[in-house]
Image (spheres, helix red, strand yellow):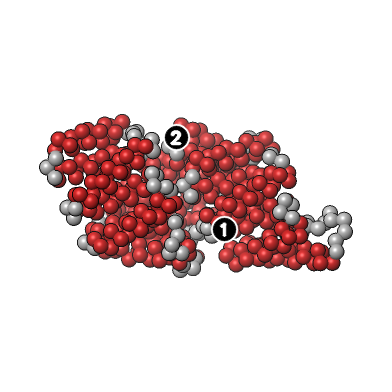
Amino acid sequence: MRSFNRMIIAAILAAASCVGADEPKQDADHAAQLKDARELNERVLKLYQAGRFAEATVPAEQALAIYEKALGPDDPEVGRCLFFLASLNDYQRKYAVAGPLFQRALANLEKAFGPDHPTVVMCLYGLGGIQNHLGKQLEAEKSYERALRIQEKLAGPIDRQVLDIVSALAATYASLRKYREAEPLFRRALAGQEKMLGPDDRAVALTLGRMANMDSAQGKYAEAKPLLERGIAIFEKSAGPNDLGLADFLWDLAWLNVKEGKGAVAEPLARRALSIREKSLSPDDIDIAGSLNHLALVYTSEKKYALAEPLYRRAVAIKEKAVGINTNDPWLAFTLMNLANSCKELGKYADAEALDNRALAILEKAAGPDSVEVAEVLNNMGRLYAGQKKYGQAEPLYRRAVAIFERAGVAGRPELAAALTNLAELCEQQGRHADAVPLRQRAEAIRAKAP
């Protein structure tokens, strides 16, 4: 989303300065309303440029309400305001709020300007980012593909926005494990950005980070590491050692080291990422919660559960303050799961059970009762009960997890292999070795075929 900053600013400037220019005659009240809206948008623009997105949201909402009343819901100025309000919520990580606003903006601007207009591209690009954040990668794929077709038609294949979309689409393909589709797009984006913007541009760094994440997901750590290190060098050179953009790269490099079993290398990277965010953001910013969760994950990988637990609890508290205790936010659910694991390892079984149950309730509502996210919680809960020798409670959870993974089409993926292994171990712990053998055989066959 942030790579389209120039387009966002152009949209709000248009809404702030152009409304009413072509109106033939206006009564005094109508003219005053539009003047108020323009002044509100000018204030929004200043706050936006200062990075004060939360403060900008209220006047943006007020301007939108005025335009809807004065011009009607189908006026394109309403669409531009909807787009900008969606963008402000996107910057604040309020993805559930931003998504419907982008949808409304898209419908409005398509109706006003037709399906192949630059403002339609803006909306599709923003919407694709939201869909990715909400775990709706298949929808994001469609949004980015359509945005790319339109932008290539408008500007040709060598265009800044085209390359931004290509990079985002490649990352979406990678998250769907469509690596063959992702790789040539990444190469196209990187080559084009380096040629157009230079090798040290932040857009180049973003594409490098996305490529590294794809390599890391495939276990290609040796290929991923230099990409991340180059991205870090670009940010440090262009913006200094405390730039917020560095935090994501530092964490990605830390997590890569965790995957390689190098927790001691990962710790200072994760701590530095947290420190950068703490210096630049308010203590209750949800990005702080993300970095707390990340550092706790590193401690967990080193079995430092007593250090991890308070960090998870701080992350949960920040997220709850931001979105409410009764939210159905998947990120909160996964952090609750992480906290539950630490509690389990520390012998706090009652706390762990309550946390897992809460995570399960959130994900059943947010992702659906047959989602792979729910299956991950079920596996978590099964391990909790099995560790207490409560086999009767653990087994149906494991079996439900296996069934979900099978129905979800992940029959050849490691998630199913892990669930089958858990179930096999449970059978063995009860002396049911004949039941365990075919389960282990299936798990081993899956792992043998894994890339």
Residue 380, percent from left and from top: 29, 51
Callout 2 crowding tier (Cα within 10 Å): few <14, some 14–19, many ≥20: some
Q: Is residue 309 visible?
A: yes
Compared across the picture, whether 92 is left or right of 47 comes to left
The residue lying furthest to the bottom in this view is 283
Residue 143 higher or lower than 26, as above or below: above
Q: Is residue 444 visible?
A: no
Q: Residue at x 85, y 61 (%)?
A: 26
Residue at 34 percent across and 46 percent down: it is 375
At numbered mark 1, what does the secondary structure look like: helix, strand or loop?
A: helix
As displayed, is residue 392 above or below residue 190?
Answer: below
Query: As displayed, is residue 42 above or below residue 130?
Result: below
Which class describes the residues within 10 Å of circle 1: few (<14), some (14-19), or many (20+)?
many
Tell me what residue is drawn at x 55 percent, y 38 percent.
142
Which residue does the numbered mark 1 point to in the structure image? 89
Q: Identify which residue, 258 or 181, lies in the foreground.
A: 181
What residue sits 45% from the left and 39% below the top? 176
**Residue denoted by label 2:** 179
Marks 2/1: CA–CA distance: 31 Å
In the image: residue 175, left or right of residue 1: left
Is residue 258 left or right of 231 when viewed as pictured?
left
First of labels 2, 1 by sequence position: 1
Measured as percent of width and height from the top left, residue 71 is found at 76, 56
Which three-letter amino acid code belongs to the residue tagged 1? Asn
Horizontal and vertical percent position of residue 445? 26, 31
Q: From the image, state whether disc 2 or disc 1 is nearer to you.
A: 1
- Provide the secondary structure element on which disc 2 rests: helix
Is 334 displayed left or right of 141 in the figure?
left
